[in-house]
Amino acid sequence: MAQLPGVPADCNSWGMTRFIVRLLINALALWITTMLVAGVSVVAYEPNDTLAQVLTFLLVAGIFGIVNGVIGNFIRIVAFPVYILTLGLIALVVNSLLLLLVAWISDLIGFGLEVDGFWWGVLGAVVLALLSWLISIVLRPVLGKNARR
């Protein structure tokens, strides 16, 4: 296992470190997505506060990770035959619906992700997935082999 800076060698918390790294990668990808896709935005709980903006991106990334990890995996397992029939194109619809679900959940708490419609959700989900993948590839040499699992 690769030794991360600031993490003690005898620490067996690779799972927690991996979670935090994934959270930061998703938050960064979400931030870049909001700059590239006009129909996807994040509204902070304090409008003109940089710390509030960063914490909001981290919160939305956390919600997205939980929704994608729990509901997304369930949908992928149940809809496996549909994935085969559509050659995986249904993943665009599933990912955009998951992004819209995150927008709905964050709307319930009064701030967070805003998506202007289904097609903006499709574009936002594609850009978010590509950016998250790209950032993960760039960080893989720093994190080591275990970042893949």
Image: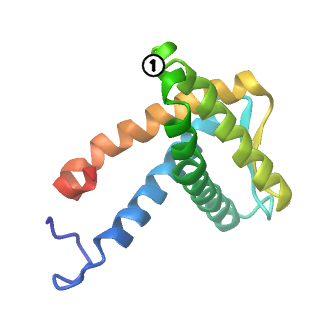
| For residue 19, above or below residue 119 | below
In the rendered image, residue 31, in percent from the top left (x then y), is placed at 58, 45
**How many numbered circles are shown?**
1
Hey, what amino acid is under mark 1? Ile
Task: Look at the picture and state if 99 lies above or below 106.
Answer: above
| Residue 54 drawn at (x, y percent) | 61, 61
| Residue in the image at 63% along x and 65% along y | 55
Q: Residue furthest top?
A: 86
Decide if residue 144 is in sight here: no
Name the residue: 58% across, 60% down: 62
**In the image: residue 113, left or right of residue 8:** right
Query: Which residue lies at the image location 16% right of the left edge and 81% below the top edge?
Result: 9
Inspect this view and state whether residue 133 appears. Answer: yes
Task: Give residue 113's position: percent from left, percent from top.
Answer: 73, 47
Q: Residue at x 38, y 38 (%)?
A: 133
13 or 47: which is nearer to us? 13
Lateral position of residue 86 relative to residue 12, left or right = right
